[in-house]
Image (cartoon, grey):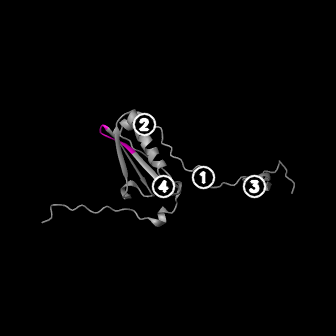
Amino acid sequence: MRQNPSNWWHFLQKEPIMMKTPVRRAFKGEASMIHFNYPNYPMQWYKNKNPVSGNAGQFNYKVLRDGDELAAWCWMGMWCMEKTKDVKERRFAFGEEGVAQAIAWLKEEFDSHSREEIESKLGFFTTEPYTPPKEESGDEQ
């Protein structure tokens, strides 16, 4: 069929553009596909006690101002912090230096996990959310 530019449907007659290079996964020994990139927020963000949270694959983190300290948490898995049993926490002095220390600690924690663990997609099928035991109240008579 001849393509006539005056026909408004001529774009339907063209062959679709196919991607020439297929996307592939990283092989053993190659760099990971998932990287830890902490967002760059101004100090005012932390001063207003806004949380910074995110993830890189199965590695999750949260940073929040708590009084005169900056609290940082990290955990592995697909569940939220409240539903995860093994959550690591560190506290830093509040300020630009404390933010830099928190970011460095989070990067160190990220690098301490294997690429297979970070890139795993089986967590939903192999884990259950953690439910902490209920606290007993001393008011029972």
The residue where tag 1 is placed is: 29
Mark 1 to mark 4: distance in Å? 20 Å
The image shows residue 6 at horizontal and vertical percentages of 83, 48
The residue where tag 4 is placed is: 58
The image shows residue 4 at horizontal and vertical percentages of 85, 50
> In terms of sequence position, does the residue under pointer 1 or pointer 3 come before the other?
3
The residue where tag 3 is placed is: 16
Mark 1 to mark 3: distance in Å? 36 Å
Q: Pointer 3 and pointer 4: residues touching (CB < 8 Å)? A: no
Measuring 38% from the left and 41% from the top, which residue is drawn there?
Answer: 50
Asked which quadrant contains residue 101, the reply is top left
Q: Is residue 65 magenta?
A: yes
- Considering the numbered disc 3 on the image, is that residue within a helix, a strand or a loop? loop
Lateral position of residue 118 relative to residue 84, left or right: right
Mark 4: give few (<14), some (14-19) or many (20+) Cα within 10 Å: many
Mark 3 to mark 4: distance in Å? 36 Å
Asked which quadrant contains residue 129, the reply is bottom left
Mark 1: give few (<14), some (14-19) or many (20+) Cα within 10 Å: few
The residue where tag 2 is placed is: 100
> In terms of sequence position, does the residue under pointer 3 or pointer 4 come before the other?
3
**Amino acid at the residue labelled 3:** Pro
